[in-house]
Amino acid sequence: DNTCQVHLTDANGKLIGDAQVTVTLIMPAMPSMGMPEMKSSLALPWDAGSQTYTGKGQPPMAGSWNVLVEARKNGGAIASLHTHLSAK
């Protein structure tokens, strides 16, 4: 199951359910193999039932991906997270 779930809270721990949340997978370029950088993005809509931003997707190919999770509200960034994913 390739489900992404994001819990977004303010400084007081209150859930934020009216933001735009996006997960972007980035595979760095590999010039020695002739491969350009690859990107794949997934918007996560708010799921009131689970109180999370939830969506399904999968990396376009196996390998090591940088992951950027961004939350925006009223046109400005309110949170971001950088992590990594190893897809098989």
Image: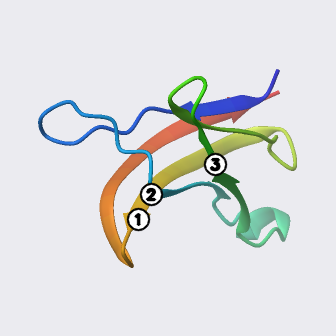
Position of residue 22 in the picture relative to residue 59 (left or right): left
Q: Is residue 44 above or below residue 20?
A: above
- Identify the element where label 3 is drawn: strand
- The label number, if any, that marks residue 19 in the structure image: 2
Residue extending farthest to the front is: 48
- The label number, if any, that marks residue 72 in the structure image: 1
- Residue 2 placed where, x, y %? 78, 28
- Residue type at the position of mark 3: Leu
- Residue type at the position of mark 1: Arg
Which image quadrant: the N terminus?
top right
Q: Residue at x 63, y 61 (%)?
A: 28
Closer to the N terminus: mark 1 or mark 3?
3
Q: Residue at x 65, y 33 (%)?
A: 4
- Residue 63 placed where, x, y %? 76, 39
In space, the residues marked 1 and 3 are separated at their CA atoms by: 12 Å
Residue denoted by label 3: 44
